[in-house]
Amino acid sequence: MWQRLSPRARWGLLVALVALALAALDVWWFETYRHNFPFDVDEAGYTTFGLVDYLGLKSGGIGGWWEAIQNQPTFAPLVPAVTSLLVFVKPGLLDGFATLTFFAVVLALAAYAIGERLAGPRLGALAAIVTATLPGTFAFSREYIFALPTAAFLSLAVFFLLKSEGMRRSRWAAICGVAVGLMLLSRTMAISYVPGLLVAALVAILARREGDLPKRFLNLGLTALVAVAVAATWYARNLQSVIDYLTNYGYGSQSKNYGKEHALLSWGRFHSVAEHMTTEDLFLPLALLFLVALAALAVLVLRRLGDPDSRASTWRRLAASDALSVAIVFVLGYGALMTSQNGGDGFTFPIAALLPCIAVLAIKAYPRAAVPAAGLVGLIAAVNLVSTATIWSFASHTRLVSVPGFEEPFPVTKGVPKAVFAIRLQVPGPETVFDRRDEGWPRADREVTGLLAGLYGPHGEGPVVAFASRNRAISSNTVQLATVGKYHRGIFFTQLSAEPNDSVRTYRRQLSDPAFGQPTVLMTTSSNAGDFPPLVTQAYAIAAAKQLGFRRIHTLTLPDGRRLAMWRKRPAGSDQAPQPRQLLQQHRDRERDDDQAGHG
């Protein structure tokens, strides 16, 4: 049977088997290393979205599910929505990681489709396996954010663009539009990659002069129309919140907290994107290998253009080539990322995932390099695989090498999962894994949730809770996740911000102004060391709260020894707020009743 398959099918089947084997490794990894351990701030927030979508589906069917998705503003809904379907089948907080594993397989297959078209089945398979074993692929399949699905849909959009043959084939043009729309629904910042796709399509239309030019432009319009129609299923209702968020965090006042300040058109911006791509997505060995491959391709193109007799024909062939289309998407995507100071988490990964497909063209052009290049790639992939498995601390240890011209050293090996790294910036513990002490953080979230449940009003109205701390392990997001998971309802949380300045006056305004929700509960910590910037001075927040009539009703010791204090503003018309011991006893009684109900 194997012999009856075409070379394209045989190599494609090999890629699928490798991708599924890596998917099985991912499932084992997150079941072993993420179960009962803390989520970082973003993971907790996105997981809560998935639970809310699931609860909408459970209580209201498809209509309730759709309404829950529509009522989720600002952050793209596709990944939590898909996760909610898995939760409906088998409830669990780790279903989000299964969603990412699925998209890792999709990305590998999309990479094979592009690579096979550019360089043939064998080199296409090499490109796909390199993509499947990129450090970024491992990293973003093990942190519940949206980089991996975005990369998968961008690669699919590129492949469908190539299949449209310069927008000559209407069906593939429409399918390309579907992929673009789904990419935008996967992550809002993915709009950065749309100009590259548009320009690549225009160049292909103009360079491939055969056929009906008006029809090609109509098909380009069809691609755009389908993409807008797919994306509008959510953006039509939430576009303004997306614009506000992207302009504020991408180009506004908040962007300074997520990247270094450089002029828009500067070596600093170019340098910053390269640093993010190398540090997060590739690591130094692969980055150097890709750099050599791109340099070899540049030499080849310049050599062919150097012949004046064939220069015009070479330009035409280059402009009409699939390789140029992929390169345009990469280059313009890179340029779009340079426009923002915010380096983001995984922003560069979708375009980095296109590099293996471009790099194998160098092997096609220089076939003598095929065997050593394949061997070197295999060695790098094996090292990445062993280090990211986190079963051998020596292999997973971070090893950095300085490179001239760059301030920060680049990793050669780094098996530290991103979520573990995020927590370890503030919470001491093993470099590459969570340990038993870290299990205390989800328990602390549940205890805070139980205490807040005792503060609901007589008609079921929940408290408005402000977090003064910007802690990495316990936050409004992690407590909200515990609340929705346990009680199937949310609490209104707000975050105190050191804007316009870190002062008692600023926090007094945020605790009393209706624009901030007029919080009735405040959470502070005994230390803000290691918090997310901009730091909120806890003493200033406490002073502001006391001036407004807040009093401390409970103190909880966190796993790292800090103390989390809960402050409550005396309700209007109430002579006495609940006493700390009373709240604690109510929480313990509820926990006991829940345990007995579960055992029954």
Image: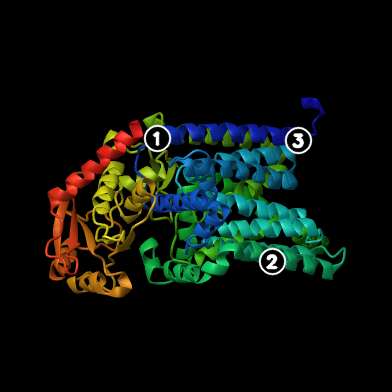
Could you tell me how far apart the alpha carbons at marks 3 and 2 are, in whole angstroms?
Answer: 32 Å
- Residue at 66 percent across and 51 percent down: it is 156
The residue pinned by badge 1 equals 33
Question: Which numbered tag is attached to residue 224?
Answer: 2
- Residue 377 versus residue 212 in the image, above or below: above
Residue 244 coordinates in the image, percent (x, y): 46, 71
Q: Say whether disc 2 or disc 1 marks the residue closer to the N-terminus.
A: 1
Which of the pair 344/25 is nearer the observer? Answer: 25
Q: Label 1 neighbourhood size at 10 Å, few (<14), some (14-19), many (20+)?
A: some
Q: Is residue 300 left or right of residue 530?
A: right
Which of the pair 123/521 is nearer the observer? Answer: 521
Going by the numbered disc 1, the residue's amino acid type is Tyr
- Residue at 58 percent across and 31 percent down: it is 21
Going by the numbered disc 2, the residue's amino acid type is Ala
Q: Say whether disc 3 or disc 2 marks the residue closer to the N-terminus.
A: 3
Instruction: Kindly tell me whether residue 543 is visible in this rendering.
Output: yes
The chosen color scheme is: rainbow
Residue 179 coordinates in the image, percent (x, y): 66, 55
Q: Which picture quadrant has residue 92?
A: top left
Going by the numbered disc 3, the residue's amino acid type is Ala
Could you tell me how far apart the alpha carbons at marks 2 and 1 are, in whole angstroms?
Answer: 42 Å
The residue pinned by badge 3 equals 9
| Label 1 SS | helix
